[in-house]
Amino acid sequence: MRDRSRPLILGASGHGRVVADIASRLNRYEQIAFLDDDEGKTSALDHPVLGTVATVDRYLEDFDVFVAVGDNQVRQRLQLGLQARSASLATLVHPSAVLGSQVSLGAGTAVMAGAVINCGSVVGRGCIINTSASLDHDNVLEDFVHISPGAHLAGTVHVGEGTWIGIGACVINNLRLAGGCRIGAGAVVISDIVERGTYVGIPARRR
């Protein structure tokens, strides 16, 4: 039987260390470890780096795996590869985050400190809800979306797969955002975004 009390975090840089800090605060893990492609790293936050990402198959029987990579496309590639090999994927929620009733989180998603996800929201696989971000009621985030620190989505917003919403950005209610978009820092989205691209400014316009 696999031991489900040990998370293995892919990536030992800043995002990975934040993820490890969340795991350590949950008080249910007996060991936390990393894999990282910087072979000079031997530890992060006093947790061992066991090897490079390419060695992950050695550990799939003993660890739950979490892909701690901020880049949406890289995170998607790594996580889908792990799922194809039947890896067990962790989902991590900081103790200070607030989750409303009937909120669902996909495998491999991280919810950081101070984040709020209100009732009826659905968050897909491999998403990042970063520090003090908020999703109001009935949001839908498709897989591998990144909501940056301090970004806010009003109610009933639908965000397509792989979209990145920058720090401090705001999205008004009842909108749909296409997949693969980048919403700039501080942007204010007031209408549907139907085409992939980069959107900046107040109101947000395609660059």
Image (cartoon, rainbow, N blue to C red):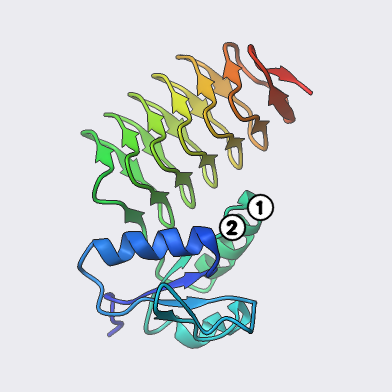
Split into 4 quadrants, where in the image is the N terminus?
bottom left
Instruction: From the image, tell me which residue sits under label 2.
Output: 75
> Residue, x 41% and y 40% (percent of image)?
123
Q: Are marks 1 and 2 in contact (CB under 8 Å)?
A: yes
Q: Amino acid at mark 1?
A: Gln
Give the image location of residue 66, x and y in percent. Answer: 45, 65
Query: Left or right: where does residue 130 sit relative to residue 118?
Result: right
Residue at 38 percent of width and 78 percent of height? 63
Can you tell which quarter of the image residue 203 is in? Answer: top right
Residue under the point 59% across and 67% down: 81
At a point 52% along the width and 28% down the height, the residue shown is 168
Q: Left of 73 or right of it: where is 136?
A: left
Residue 73: assigned label? 1
Tell me, yes or no, if residue 151 can be seen here. Answer: yes
In this picture, is 162 found above or below 151?
Answer: below
Q: Residues within 10 Å of mark 1 (few under 14, many from 20)?
A: some
Q: How many marks?
A: 2
Q: Is residue 94 above or below residue 66?
A: above
Quadrant for residue 200, please give it: top right
Q: Judging from the image, what secondary structure is the residue with disc 2 in? A: helix
Q: Secondary structure at mark 1?
A: helix
Left or right of 42, for residue 46: left
Residue 68 in view, yes or no? no
Q: Position of residue 128 (x, y in %)?
A: 47, 47
| CA neighbours of label 2 inside 10 A, class few (<14), some (14 to 19), many (20+) | many
Task: Say which of 83 and 77 sits in front.
Answer: 77
User: Which part of the image, by quadrant, shows the C terminus?
Assistant: top right
Q: CA distance from mark 1 to mark 2?
A: 5 Å
Q: Is residue 133 above or below residue 1?
A: above
